[in-house]
Image (cartoon, rainbow, N blue to C red):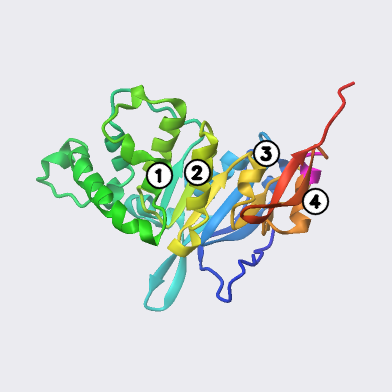
C-alpha cells in the first residue's frame, strides 16, 4: 500500500507523526504478509477488520513489541537539519517509552493497587530521578499523588479549552479506589488513562471501547476526535464500525485486498468494508443532531 494522502478538510495538512515503511506481518491475513507502507498523521486513526485479520499484531508491531518490525516503524525527530525519521530500534528505551504509548486488548488489572497509582505508571517515563531518590528505589510511586494532584488542579482551567482525558474517562471520581473494587468498564477506563498519561506523541489503543458503556464510548470518541488539534496521533483497533466512523481516518485490514487507508467519508472505503464483511452490512449516511454521519447497518440474513 502506497502512502496515501488523507483529506482532513483543512488548508494545512496535519504533520506525520508515524511512518510505516515496507512492513509485513508474520501473523494475520495473507494480504498483510506482503510489504505495505503508510504515514500516520496527527489525529485519530481507527484500525478495523475482521477477527484474526491482524489488527492486534499491527499495533504490537507499531509499539515495537515484535522485534522484526522495529526497523520498519519510524518516528520523526527534530534536528538542526530539519525533521529526520528514526527507526524504533535506533531509539533508547526511555526515548521509545516517551514516544509511543500502548494499551493491549483485555489487559489484566487486579490487586489492591489504587487507581491513582495505576494511572501514574503511564507518566513514569517522564519522571526525573536521581541515584539517591528513595521513591525511585521503591518504584517511583510516591510521586503519583503529587502528579495527579497537579493534573486535577489544572482540570477546571482546561475545561474552556476542551475536554481533558481525565474528564472524558471520569477518572477523577476513582482516584482513591482500589482496582479490585472496580467493574470491568471502570478498569478499562483506568487502563486507557494509564496509556494517555504517558503523554506520548503516538498512542496505540487495542479495543479501547471494550466493556465501556455508551456514555463513555462517546465521551472517549469526542476526546479522540480532538487529537489533531493536540498534535497527537492515536490509533485504535476496534470492531465497532459506527464508533470508527468518528475518526479522522480509517485503516481497513482485509483478507482480499492490501490495507486501505482512507477518509471515513470515502465511498471506496465503504464498498471495501462491505466486501470485507461479505455483504453482512451496508453503509449509509444518516442525518442526526450532529449533522450527516455514516453508519453501518446489518443486513437481515436467513440461516438455512
Dot 4: few (<14), some (14–19), or many (≥20) neighbours within 10 Å?
Answer: some
Q: Which residues are magenta?
A: 274-278
Circle 2/circle 1 CB separation < 8 Å? yes
Residue depicted at x 40% and y 44%:
195
Q: Which mark is residue 205?
A: 2
According to the picture, the residue beneath numbered tag 4 turns out to be: 271
Q: Secondary structure at mark 1?
A: helix
> Which numbered disc, 1 or 3, marks the residue that appears first in the sequence?
3
| Quadrant in the picture for the C terminus | top right
Q: CA distance from mark 2 to mark 1?
A: 8 Å
Disc number placed over residue 195 in the picture, else none = 1
Q: Nearer the viewer, residue 104 or 67?
A: 104
Instruction: Estimate the spatial distance between the alpha carbons at disc 3 and disc 2, rounded to whole Å.
Output: 17 Å
Which secondary structure, mark 3?
Answer: loop
User: Who comes first in sequence, dot 4 or dot 3?
Assistant: 3
In the figure, is residue 31 to the left or right of 221? right
Q: Earlier in the sequence, mark 2 or mark 4?
A: 2
The span from disc 2 to disc 4 (Cα, nearest Å) is: 26 Å
x, y percent for residue 103: 45, 40
The image shows residue 64 at horizontal and vertical percentages of 47, 47
Q: Residue at x 39, y 28 (%)?
A: 109
Judged by its main secondary structure, the magenta piece is helix
Q: Which residue is mark 3?
A: 53
Amino acid at each position: 500500500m502506497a502512502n496515501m494522502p488523507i483529506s482532513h478538510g483543512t488548508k494545512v495538512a496535519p504533520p506525520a507523526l508515524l511512518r510505516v515503511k515496507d512492513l509485513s506481518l508474520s501473523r494475520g491475513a495473507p494480504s498483510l504478509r506482503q510489504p505495505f507502507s503508510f504515514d500516520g498523521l496527527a489525529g485519530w486513526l481507527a484500525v478495523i477488520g475482521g477477527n484474526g485479520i491482524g489488527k492486534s499484531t499491527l499495533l504490537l508491531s507499531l509499539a515495537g513489541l515484535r522485534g522484526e518490525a522495529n526497523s520498519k516503524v519510524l518516528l520523526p525527530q527534530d534536528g538542526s537539519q530539519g525533521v529526520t525519521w528514526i527507526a524504533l530500534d535506533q531509539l533508547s528505551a526511555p526515548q521509545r517509552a516517551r514516544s509511543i504509548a500502548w494499551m493491549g486488548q483485555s489487559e489484566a488489572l487486579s490487586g489492591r493497587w489504587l487507581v491513582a497509582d495505576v494511572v501514574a505508571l503511564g507518566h513514569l517515563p517522564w519522571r526525573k530521578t536521581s541515584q539517591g531518590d528513595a521513591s525511585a528505589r521503591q518504584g517511583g510511586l510516591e510521586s503519583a499523588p503529587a502528579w495527579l494532584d497537579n493534573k486535577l488542579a489544572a482540570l477546571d482551567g482546561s475545561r474552556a479549552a476542551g475536554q481533558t482525558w481525565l474528564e472524558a474517562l471520569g477518572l477523577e471520581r476513582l482516584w482513591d479506589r482500589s482496582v479490585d473494587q472496580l467493574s470491568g468498564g471502570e478498569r478499562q477506563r483506568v487502563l486507557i488513562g494509564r496509556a494517555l498519561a504517558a503523554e506520548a506523541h503516538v498512542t496505540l489503543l487495542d479495543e479501547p471501547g471494550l466493556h465501556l458503556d455508551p456514555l463513555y464510548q462517546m465521551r472517549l470518541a469526542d476526546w479522540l476526535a480532538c487529537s489533531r488539534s493536540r498534535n497527537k496521533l492515536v490509533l485504535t483497533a476496534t470492531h465497532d464500525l459506527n464508533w470508527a466512523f468518528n475518526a479522522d481516518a480509517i485503516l481497513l485490514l482485509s483478507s482480499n485486498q492490501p490495507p486501505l487507508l482512507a477518509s471515513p467519508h470515502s465511498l471506496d472505503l465503504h464498498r471495501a468494508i462491505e466486501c470485507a464483511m461479505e455483504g453482512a452490512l451496508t453503509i449509509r449516511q444518516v442525518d442526526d443532531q450532529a449533522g450527516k454521519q455514516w453508519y453501518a447497518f446489518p443486513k437481515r440474513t436467513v440461516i438455512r
